[in-house]
Image: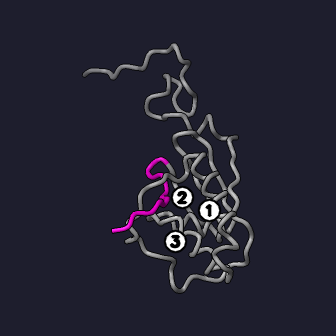
């Protein structure tokens, strides 16, 4: 069977939720969260279960009523950004992944964009079970503080 490069969401390190057409993603490995516009969200939805690059390009073009060649460069740039941020990871697609949904709502074309936020990075990187002292979460224990030991008895 022919193999072609594709992308899938980097689960379980990335959480993905679509809200009113916009994608909200959290990379638990870096503590950054992201927002993708409606066309970016459509691409991430296709990549959620794994899709070849050609399927991603074709799927977005069909949703926007355009030719694949008109969106190919923008899709490649979006996937490059998403991969560099750890949102998607490449894989070898055997072509068996499903294509775009048949009844998908038509989108007005806007180049897919991924916006990065790191203002909650420290909080998202806390481990509420292990990175605390006697004060408790969300207070992070100093790096030189030994972990509390469970009481016996």
- Crowd band around label 1 with a 10 angstrom C-alpha radius: few (<14), some (14–19), many (20+): many
- Tag 2 residue: 16
Q: Secondary structure at mark 2?
A: strand
Q: Position of residue 151 (x, y in %)?
A: 32, 21
The alpha-carbon separation of the residues under discs 3 and 2 comes to 20 Å
SS assignment at label 1: strand
Is tag 3's residue or tag 1's residue first in the polypeptide sequence?
Answer: 1
Q: Is residue 126 left or right of residue 67?
A: left
Query: Which residue is pictured at 52% across the width and 43% down the height?
Result: 28
Q: Is residue 11 above or below residue 103?
A: above
Residue projecting furthest to the left = 153
Q: Position of residue 47 (x, y in %)?
A: 51, 64
Disc marking residue 55: 3
Q: Quadrant of residue 65?
A: bottom right
Q: Magenta residues, as a range?
A: 1-13
**Magenta stretch encompasses residue 143:** no
Disc with the residue nearer the chain's start (3 vs 2): 2
User: Which mark, residue 23?
Assistant: 1
For marks 1 and 2, the one nearer the N-term is 2
């Amino acid at each position: 069977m022919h193999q072609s490069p594709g992308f899938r969401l980097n689960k379980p390190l990335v959480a993905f939720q679509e809200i009113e057409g916009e994608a909200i993603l959290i990379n638990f490995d870096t503590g950054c969260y992201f927002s993708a516009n409606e066309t970016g969200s459509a691409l991430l939805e296709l990549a959620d279960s794994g899709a070849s690059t050609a399927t991603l390009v074709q799927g977005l073009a069909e949703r926007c009523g355009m030719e694949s060649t008109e969106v190919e460069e923008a899709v490649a740039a979006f996937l490059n950004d998403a991969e560099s941020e750890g949102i998607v990871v490449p894989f070898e697609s055997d072509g068996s992944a499903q294509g775009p949904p048949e009844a998908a709502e038509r989108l007005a074309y806007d180049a897919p964009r991924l916006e990065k936020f790191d203002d909650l990075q420290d909080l998202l990187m806390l481990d509420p079970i292990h990175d605390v002292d006697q004060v408790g979460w969300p207070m992070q224990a100093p790096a030189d503080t030994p972990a509390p030991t469970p009481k016996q008895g």
